[in-house]
């Protein structure tokens, strides 16, 4: 505020007030971060489910066979 030309001579604040403000804003930032992470995880899960439903709309065994081939190769366990 000093950089903006505000007269801070008459302003009084305590260390406790500054610490409380910092803790309050830190907790708010942590909650936003956790929310963003959860939103990302949910989006990834939905994308995987959507992809699986497109590749295997009827639940047939062909999809499972294809999946095993992708993971183990064509010569892998059947």
Image (cartoon, rainbow, N blue to C red):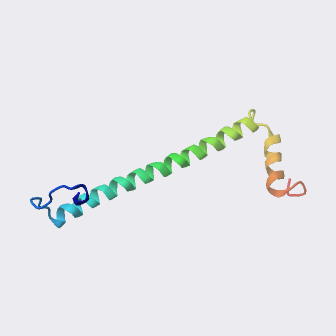
Left or right: residue 5 compared with residue 65: left
Q: Nearer the viewer, residue 23 or 42?
A: 23
Left or right of residue 42, residue 75 in this image: right
Name the residue rendered at 21%, 62% in the picture.
Answer: 18
For the residue pair 70 and 33, the one nearer the viewer reads as 33
Q: Name the spot of residue 76 as percent of width and height, x first.
A: 86, 58
Q: Would residue 35 be found to the left or right of residue 16 on screen?
A: right
Q: Residue at 43% across / 53% down in the picture?
A: 33
Taking the view exactly as shown, the residue that stands out farthest to the right is: 75
Residue 7 relative to residue 29: left or right: left
The quadrant of the picture occupied by the N terminus is bottom left
The image shows residue 75, relative to residue 61, as above or below, that is below
Position of residue 38 measured from the top left corner of the image (x, y, whole percent): 49, 49
Residue found at the far left of this picture? 10
How many numbered discs? 0
The residue lying furthest to the front in this view is 5
Q: Residue furthest bottom?
A: 15
Query: How far from the left and from the top, in percent, is residue 51?
Result: 70, 40
Residue 55 placement: quadrant: top right
The one nearer the camera, 77 or 39, is 39
Residue in the image at 79% along x and 37% along y: 60
């Amino acid at each position: 505020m000093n950089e903006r030309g505000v007269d801070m001579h008459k302003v009084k604040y305590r260390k406790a007030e500054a610490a409380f403000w910092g803790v309050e804003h830190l907790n708010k930032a942590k909650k936003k971060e956790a929310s963003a992470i959860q939103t990302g995880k949910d989006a990834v899960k939905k994308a995987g489910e959507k992809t699986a439903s497109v590749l295997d709309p009827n639940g047939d065994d062909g999809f499972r066979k294809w999946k095993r081939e992708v993971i183990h190769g064509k010569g892998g366990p059947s």
